[in-house]
Image (cartoon, grey):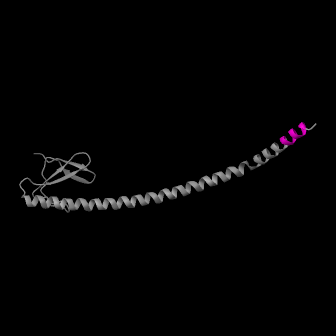
């Protein structure tokens, strides 16, 4: 049997058909089956088939605690991310409103002489119409 491995980034993972018989950081693999899938690295850990019922139950309880802890961490990260997004959105909205107000003010300043000229033309037109309608 030839030694083959797939490389995921800096990790070298044995091919799925091999049983891993060493310790992974924080994971006890004695008497357990570990499956590594190809593509995006996925690790599935399950108790060995020859384990006692008590050992299997303890394994499930430990996995449940680990999952609950990881879910707690994910919820915390999600809350932090939500707060960061809200802050970034408020900042972006403030910047957008400031830029719009500045652009509106610049446009009003740019067209002010034309608006004043339009007011005089309107008043002049009204005067002409009024004078034309007098007997």
Residue 106 horizontal/vertical position (percent): 67, 52
In terms of image quadrants, where is residue 28?
bottom left
Q: Residue at x 12, y 51 (%)?
A: 19
What quarter of the picture does the C terminus occupy?
top right
Q: Position of 115 compared to 101: left or right?
A: right
Q: How many marks?
A: 0
Residue 131 belongs to the span the image colors magenta: yes
In terms of image quadrants, where is residue 11?
bottom left
Q: Position of 108 compared to 73: left or right?
A: right
Q: Residue at x 24, y 59 (%)?
A: 67
Per the rendered image, the range of residues in magenta is 125-133
Of 32 and 15, which appears nearest the observer?
Answer: 32
Q: Residue at x 83, y 45 (%)?
A: 123
Residue 100 horizontal/vertical position (percent): 60, 52
Residue 107 belongs to the span the image colors magenta: no
Of 14 and 39, which appears nearest the observer?
Answer: 39
């Amino acid at each position: 049997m030839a030694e083959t491995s797939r490389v995921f980034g800096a990790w070298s993972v044995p091919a799925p058909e091999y049983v891993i018989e060493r310790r992974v950081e924080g994971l006890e693999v004695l008497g357990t089956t570990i499956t590594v899938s190809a593509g995006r690295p996925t690790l599935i850990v399950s108790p060995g088939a020859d384990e006692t019922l008590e050992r299997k139950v303890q394994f499930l309880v430990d996995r449940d605690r680990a999952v609950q802890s990881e879910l707690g961490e994910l919820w915390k990260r999600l809350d932090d991310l939500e707060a960061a997004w809200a802050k970034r959105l408020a900042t972006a909205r403030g910047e957008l409103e400031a830029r719009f107000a500045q652009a509106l003010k610049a446009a009003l300043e740019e067209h002010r002489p034309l608006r004043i000229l339009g007011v005089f033309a309107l008043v002049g037109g009204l005067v002409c119409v009024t004078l034309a309608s007098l007997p």
